[in-house]
Image: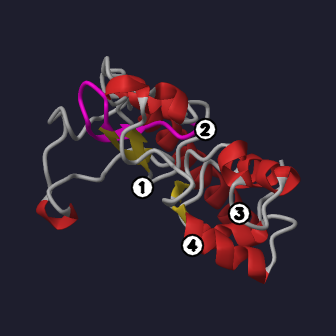
Amino acid sequence: MPELSRTQVVVYAAVAIALLLVGARAIRGEGGGEVSFASGAEAPSADAGGFSIGGQAGDLVVDVTGAVRDPGVYRMPAGSRVNDAVARAGGAAPEAQLEAINLAARLADGQQVVVPERLPGGAAAPGVASAEGPISLGTATVEQLEEIEGIGPVTAGAIVEYRDEHGGLSSVEQLDQVSGIGPATMGSLRDRLQP
């Protein structure tokens, strides 16, 4: 068998170490699960405003509030949907108006999911988008987006598609990457949308 040069030994050692690290990380990742801050399953940490933010790489932290049984801040696996977050918060309360939110939308890290409450007479509670108030970027429907001046059905559909493909949007500014949205439209969006 031919002798290995010093360079070859170093390269083989580096590859072996990299493989060991990847394997260890994969094994460590298999034992993880969801952790709810609201349930107290993870110890609080003063350096994160009272919540511990450790967890699996790729996990999302979302705030679920409104008409749910157990509102709070929850850790969700990457790729989770709004429906998963509502379920994690104990499910919708009897007075919830689930048809006012997009349960199929992907969650984004740091997102707040607000489940509106139905008022007596079937009216939506404050917080549900109306023609006068800002529309939630995380839950806006194509129809709600079309109400914004300068947004037609094609652009509204492109916004929802972009949001779903990118796992949500954390700011209105991200919409400038959507085809068909120029500076004038961005001005309208800033006035009518909230993250």
Dot 4 or dot 1: first in sequence order is 1
Which badge, 4 or 2, comes first in the chain's sequence? 2
Say whether residue 68 is magenta: yes
Residue found at x 52% / y 50%? 130
Residue 20 versus residue 143: which sits nearer the camera? 143
Q: Which residues are magenta?
A: 66-79
Distance, label 4 to label 1, CA atoms, is 22 Å
Measured as percent of width and height from the top left, residue 94 is found at 31, 17
According to the image, label 2 marks what residue? 105
Q: Which residue is mark 1?
A: 110
Query: Element type at marker 1?
Result: loop
Residue 31 visible somewhere in the drawing: no
Magenta region includes residue 145: no
Q: Nearer the viewer, residue 11 or 62?
A: 62
Q: In the rendered image, which quarter is residue 164 located in?
A: top right
Disc 4 element: helix
**C-alpha span from label 2 to label 3:** 45 Å
- Are there few (<14), some (14-19), or many (20+) residues within 10 Å of tag 2? many
Q: Is residue 121 above or below residue 172?
A: above
